[in-house]
Amino acid sequence: MPFDSLTLAAVTAQLQKKILGTRVIKVHQPNKTTIILRLHGNGDNYKLLLCAHPQQARVHLVETTEENPAQPPLFCMVLRKHLEGGRLVKISQNSWERILLLDFEITDETGMPSVRRLVVEIMGKHSNIILLDQASEVIFDGIRRYSHNLSRHREVLPGQTYLPPPLLKQPTPENINEEETWQKLLAGANFVTPLAKAISQQISGISPFLAKEIVARAGLGEETTLEYLGLLEYSRLYAAFKQIKIAYQEEEYQPVVLATGCELYDYYALPLVSVSLAEQQFFPDISQALEYYHQKKEAQNLLEARKRELNKTNQAELSRVWKKIALQEENLAEAEAADKYKEAGELLTTYIYLLKKGMDSIDLESLYEPGKMVNVELNPQLAPSDNIKQYFHRYNKAKNSRQLIESQIAAGKEELAYLESVALAIENSDDLALLAEIRQELADTGYLQQKPQPKGSKKTPAILSPHEYVSSDGYTILAGRNNRQNDYLTLNLARKDDIWLHTQKIPGSHVIIRLERGQEVSTTALVEAAAIAAWHSQARLSSQVPVDFTLVRQVKKPAGAKPGMVIYQQQKTLYVTPGLPPEQ
């Protein structure tokens, strides 16, 4: 994520206009890397977020705040002691560096005026927030303390003198005012180095992300190297660079958040030529863009983490059931010998007059395949009648075993179908509330431990609304998002004369076409509802998907069946390509 010097410059410009002169009324530390300063002044209240997270370090204003721990951390207490009541008198950025300085006028413990400086260093895994005395530069504390054991350059410890991070020796964009200077700087890079990489290496303050944007604005390819540049290309590069520099100098920022579909992937302080316009969402200021991005990204990350958690449980259960079915099928193969025992008993009964005690086997003609001889083993210690009894005993035992194993395999396959439907629901869930429903379902069915319910809460959370669509000719079509919704939709919400649809022998959603009393369903609505059922199934990427449909009155839930599992009759089948109806 490019929280680079240009992004920080956009934040600095906004903070100077909005919060300069405000007073600190409260300091919060919701987690180990984040500080929230609550400020008042200029006719409004503000919340300033300072974050030193290794991957998400940033500074910006926020509207919302996280829940704070019951006991504030030590660094939070230090900030409260030194900053609360203080007035923010200066906000500055170290040239094109990712270091923000916030100076607060306070009255110290001796009653004398003083200035406390908060240094916010946006340095990836080395990011930090450090409080120091502005005059002496003595450190009071840092959100991340470390000694020379971790850093040869400096120590961040109470009582130590503050040293800034080691700065790069290359010139910053402020020092580049002529095209010739730009060319000389790039000439110091290896000629086979990709152009964007050379720019970020030779000019301090230009991130790799910004360097790629400069190359794109110059109309050059991403893989272009220095060896292919002539005077024209250098001229175009410098012109693109000047666009960025002017935006920086005149504070002309237009923040964007970048997304493909619903998936956010970046942000920046300026519109980008290197990214298609369709992937850029514009915001009125940089803080709104950053808050939106991080809130959405954190929600996406949390959603994916919850999905992985539920998938881990579900996949473990699927693996268990697969192994159980495989073992049962092996046992079934052994139980298939029942037919051989039956045939042997029948043969011995038919040809009992040929049997004598002491025989260990006999060859007899098959009763079912004339001309075929069957060798039947005998126990020489037993009389002929006892040998016959033993074979029929083995037959009855194997037959009963086979019936039991077949019922167990059938139950296993039902459980497999259920778990596959859960896997589909997890995959298709796009918010935490839906995943909470699935988690509750897995807990209700015994696959997960029930979470303790808070006092006064309902035992079972309310079921969320299903997907709702309208067919091209105006019929309302509903589709469940998970098994709990499928049950509610089919067994509670739908009327008996509504149309029920489901992919044939494929995990998927229950789909309902709502009908008024006496209304007939149209062919268009039926085909579109079938396509919706196929879309919300495991066969979404297939074509010619079989979808069964029948009246809701023909759908029953067997006693003890798991959520979403039903039986139905009098169905007809449509073969459709998965899809959703056109937007109205």
Image (cartoon, helix red, strand yellow):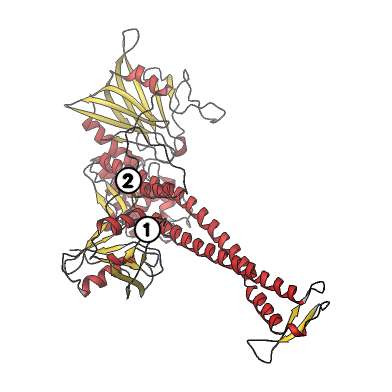
Q: Residue at x 30, y 57 (%)?
A: 491
Q: Residue at x 30, y 36 (%)?
A: 60
The amino acid type of the residue labelled 1 equals: Gly
Residues under labels 1 and 2: Cα distance?
A: 31 Å
The residue under label 1 is: 564
| Above/below status of 263 relative to 108 | below
Does the rendering let one see residue 207?
no
Q: Position of residue 130 (x, y in %)?
A: 41, 26
Q: Position of residue 124 (x, y in %)?
A: 44, 39
State left or right for residue 155 relative to residue 73.
Answer: right
Q: Position of residue 304 (x, y in %)?
A: 41, 49
Count residues near mark 1 (Cα–Cα under 10 Å), then give few for <14, some for 14-19, many for 20+. Answer: many
The residue under label 2 is: 296
| Above/below status of 308 relative to 232 | above
Mark nearer the N terminus (1 vs 2): 2
Report the residue that reaches farthest toward the top. Answer: 110
Q: Nearer the viewer, residue 394 or 13?
A: 394
